[in-house]
Image (cartoon, rainbow, N blue to C red):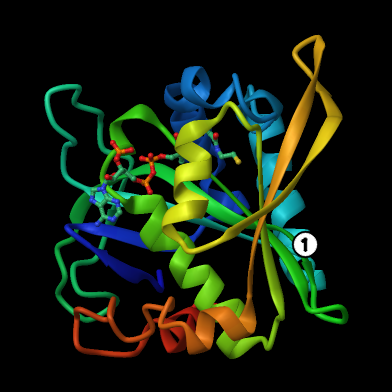
Amino acid sequence: MFSIDLGDGAQLRPLEPWQAEEFLAHMDRARELVDPWIPWASISTDLATATATLQRYADKQAADTGRLFGIWQEGGLGPAGIGPGGLEPEGGLGPGGLGRESTLVGGTMFVAFDAASGNCEIGCWLEPAGTGRGLITKAVRVLIDWAFRTRGMQRVEWHCDPRNGASSNVARRLGMTLEGTLRSAYPWKGTRRDTEIWAVLAGDWVSGQLSVSGQLSVSGQLSVSEQLSVSE
Ligand SMILES: CC(C)(COP(=O)(O)OP(=O)(O)OC[C@H]1O[C@@H](n2cnc3c(N)ncnc32)[C@H](O)[C@@H]1OP(=O)(O)O)[C@@H](O)C(=O)NCCC(=O)NCCS
């Protein structure tokens, strides 16, 4: 499968309906971390609902209204040790690759993507074994770079609960600006939640050296935005 090297044995790849079984096992590992904040693991509780979640994003991708990517980490992830989730040929799809074990540890998505208005929103999640490694910050940079440079988008938003410090830290690290808080914005787990709106604009990203285009092409092959285009 086409992939983008995030460094340290991590890869960003499309996450598609045929991977529902692997996605469900990952959701089961992620549920405890994700459930307090977003209705994401909770909508994928068995193979049918996990497949439906991935199919919904496949449909969005076909309509150019959203996209979903998984983050795979090679090998084990420390003492917590999680099992292997799949084999990917080493070095891409070249001949003779014996493959390395990799585990789906999280992902990121264009929750919304409106090419006509130039606005989009990015979301993300991890299972515990994937946290604290910068995986989301690196992966979301790739998506933002693609949105601005390849697709000519003008505005990328990030929505999070004000109490979700790990999430707002990602937005801050990416150079986003906190624009405001929607009070009592949506119902979740029997309460109504506020939503912080963070955003970065194309002009800030491109002129402010916030992008990492090229920086992540550690394999010395294509630039990040070129790789993402190839993977579509
Ligand atoms: C939000 C969430 C994805 C953030 O996870 P995270 O591991 O903190 O984020 P990143 O992958 O960007 O990693 C950043 C951490 O790795 C560290 N790090 C290590 N190497 C790094 C690198 N090269 N670049 C950036 N950070 C790096 C950072 O210091 C930071 O750790 P710290 O918080 O202890 O300072 C995670 O908490 C989660 O899945 N939460 C539940 C779902 C959720 O809330 N989703 C978002 C909804 S808006």
Hey, which quadrant is residue 2 in on the image? Answer: bottom left
Q: Circle 1 sits on which residue?
A: 60
> Would residue 198 be found to the left or right of residue 185 on screen?
left
Check the picture and name the quadrant holding the C terminus. bottom right
Hey, which quadrant is residue 183 in on the image? Answer: top right
> Would residue 71 be found to the left or right of residue 16 on screen?
left
Q: Looking at the image, can residue 2 be seen?
A: yes
Vertical comparison of 126 with 112: above or below? above
Quick one: 87 or 67, which is closer to the camera? 67
Q: Looking at the image, can residue 125 be seen?
A: no
Q: Residue furthest top?
A: 190
Vertical comparison of 56 with 39: above or below? below
- Residue drawn at x 52%, y 47% is 19
Label 1 CB, ligand 1: below 8 Å?
no
- Residue drawn at x 72%, y 67% is 61
- Residue drawn at x 53%, y 79% is 205
Quick one: 77 or 38, which is closer to the camera? 38
Vertical comparison of 58 with 55: above or below? below
Q: Position of residue 130 (x, y in %)?
A: 32, 38
Check the picture and name the quadrant holding the N terminus. bottom left
Q: Position of residue 117 (x, y in %)?
A: 86, 78
Check disc 1 and report its element: helix, strand or loop.
helix
Q: Amino acid at mark 1?
A: Lys
Vertical comparison of 17 with 163: above or below? below
Q: Position of residue 201 (x, y in %)?
A: 65, 75
Quick one: 229 or 125, which is closer to the camera? 125
Q: Position of residue 37 (x, y in %)?
A: 62, 26
> Would residue 148 be found to the left or right of residue 30 on screen?
right
